[in-house]
Image (spheres, rainbow, N blue to C red):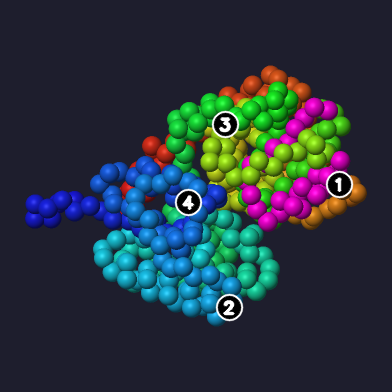
Amino acid sequence: MIVKGVVVLKKVYLFVGTLSGGGAERAVSNISMNLNDDIKRDIILFGDSASLNYPYSGEIIYLDEMKLSTLPKKLLALWYRSKKIKDLKKRETTTISFLEYPNLINCLTRKHGKSIVSVRNHMSTKYKRGLKSVFWNNTIKRLYSKTDQIIAVSYEIKKDLVKNYDINPEKVSVIYNSYPIESIQKLSKYGVEDEYSSLFNHPVIITAGRLNEQKGQWHLLRAFKKVKEDIKDAKLVFLGEGDLQKYLAQLAKDLGIDKDVYFLGFQENPFKYIEKSTLFVMSSLYEGFPNALAEAMACGIPVISSDCLSGPREIIAPNEIDKEDVNYDIVEKRFGVLTPVCDGIRYTSKDRLTKEEIMMANHMITLLENKELTKHFSKQSLTRITDFNIKNVIKQWERLI
């Protein structure tokens, strides 16, 4: 943009709070790294202790050094952070926020600059019960529609916002997550550490994501127990960290499979492990648009995913988005394998497998035993992921800014 002979850069704030491991954080990383050079971008984080696990382009702005241990401190932080954001937004800028807390602050300061909120989960599923759910459901219903634009990462999320939060559909645009496919594929070819190299001489099932309630990984562990009955040398690898790691490790021990289950933690380059694995499996109870699933497809391995709200079906079976009676058999024309979402109940090692866990296990066994089918879905992964190339999707973000 040129004003009286002076070049003026467009300016955008990407407000996410932290750049630690997570889907929203990775999305901010990808957007910042791929925006046009004529757009100046700053990334707003909460405090200087915020993790920087993902690469980024642009300046980092830290809001404060507050530790939110009590409710009064949380309220003070909300006031202080809103004030700081308001001061930043006095200039003619666009602020795009990611995740509920940054979205709340962006909404509260919406009169200052252009405010865009990004919704990255199926909110009515995420916030079903409890006081926390009452708070966030009311925030979404009362404040989001007052911003300049709402970006949903899937059509199912848009439908949820319209149906359950009374938001005008014209206010909501869908921009799928995007991925630097060439970069992912280059990183996937790196060698793994010596201590893990022999692991990949076996059939490896891998999953990636935070070890938390949303991801439902205990269902995958229980299903893997059944896989081991048929495929003795199969291994299961978890990439990611989270509150449930101790619980999951103990469950693996209780199931008697702990020697074949590996917790590798957060990895800056998860792709080198994924590419060398046999299958990627996602057991989430709910999602927005699952980055880990799409990135696994970019690595060229077959994927199995729960048909949770939302995202997996839009990736794996895009022609069946609105279908009510979904076939959960292995369907070769799809881009991966769908299984019914599990119930989210934390069963013990002594409880019988649910029908959903049995189906997940059977699909894993079928793909591990059928090399032709595995090759077919490897090709399907690579075919589908091209639709989410960041070179195409980033243009939608640039038009917003």
Which residue is denoted by mark 1 in the rendering? 254
Packing grade of label 2 (10 A; few <14, some 14-19, many >=20) is few
Q: Nearer the viewer, residue 20 or 13?
A: 20
Q: Is 137 or 215 nearer to us in this picture?
A: 215
Q: Is residue 106 above or below residue 339?
A: below
Image coordinates for residue 223, horizontal then vertical, percent:
80, 40
The disc placed on residue 52 is 4
Q: Residue furthest left?
A: 4
Q: How far apart, in angstroms, are the residues tagged by discs 1 and 3? A: 30 Å
Q: Looking at the picture, which amino acid does disc 1 mark?
A: Asp
**Residue shown at 12% from the left, 53% from the top:** 6
The location of residue 315, given as percent across then percent down, is 57, 39
Q: Which mark is residue 71?
A: 2
- Residue farthest toward the front in the current orientation of the protein: 194
Query: Disc 3 designates what residue?
Result: 272
The range drawn in magenta is 232-256
In the image, what residue type sits under mark 3? Answer: Lys
State the image quarter where residue 109 is shown. Answer: bottom left
Dot 2 amino acid type: Leu
Query: Which residue is found at the position 41% from the left and 72% from the top?
Result: 82
